[in-house]
Image: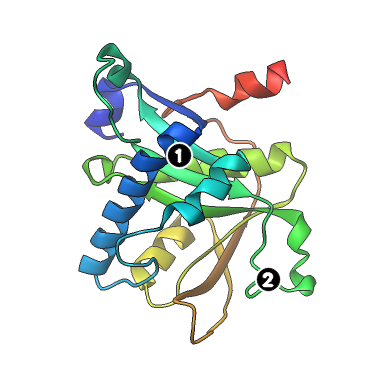
Amino acid sequence: MHTNTLLHPLALRRAEPADLPGVITLLADTAEWLYAQGVRQWPRGGFGPERIEPLIEERVLFLLDDELRYLDPDESAPPVATIALDDHADPEFWTPGDNPGAALYIHKLAVARPWSGSGLGDALLDWAGTSAHAAGLPWLRLDCAKGNPRLQSYYRSRGFRHVRTVDLPHRSSGALFERPSEDMLTTAFRDLTIAELISA
């Protein structure tokens, strides 16, 4: 595990409306980094508020925070990472034959550049798989850029199986992956969403 995660305790929580600017900044930074790598999965400059606000309103966008930031109430630190997890199967990619309702779907997974290589992407994927398992669903699914073999290789290394690639001219994404849901222990961060489930 990267030094950052040892020195900085992290916590996962649901995004709130006040988090919108930080999320947009993180996704824009990630999109710019992808462009520098020659990957066109996300719009250059990231996503506008109209794409992120619904995820916050639906309570399906989650943020990883560096808990040390709360020691300085004047500091508005951006999230360390973000992930959206929901049951919204993209109908352009997932067909009725895939049984779209049998999975949770990952969107907007991004880790801030200073935390790259820290294992947080792995931990968030494991958390998402555990969430799908807890919901009684057999699959965790995602789509990624058709032209990003490095990212596809990463997902394969994390236990995902390439289902197929849907090649639509108006979509840069379309490489579809899934892996069985599984109850996995995540120690990279505190999961504050568990308290929500208990108190609900």
Please, what is the three-letter code of the amino acid marked with disc 1? Ala
Q: Nearer the viewer, residue 86 or 55?
A: 55
Mark 2 = which residue? 91
Mark 1 = which residue? 123
Q: From the top left corner, tell me how far across and down residue 94 is, in percent.
A: 68, 70
> Is 182 left or right of 53, judged from the image as shown?
right
Query: Relative to 7, does residue 182 appear above or below in the rendering?
Result: below
Q: From the top left corner, tell me how far across and down residue 65 is, in percent.
A: 38, 29
Query: Relative to 132, does residue 79 appear above or below in the rendering?
Result: above
Q: Nearer the viewer, mark 2 or mark 1?
A: 2
Quadrant where the image shows the N terminus: top left
Query: Relative to 31, does residue 94 appear above or below in the rendering?
Result: below
Query: Relative to 138, does residue 71 appear above or below in the rendering?
Result: above
Residue 73 shows up from this direction: yes
Q: From the top left corner, tell me how far across and down residue 142 is, in percent.
A: 56, 60
Q: Quadrant of residue 120?
A: top left
Label 2 crowd bin: few (<14), some (14–19), many (20+), radius 10 Å:
few
Q: From the top left corner, tell me how far across and down residue 45 is, in percent.
A: 30, 61
Separation of disc 2 and disc 1 at Cα?
Answer: 27 Å
Please, what is the three-letter code of the amino acid marked with disc 2? Pro
Q: Residue at x 33, y 36 (%)?
A: 80
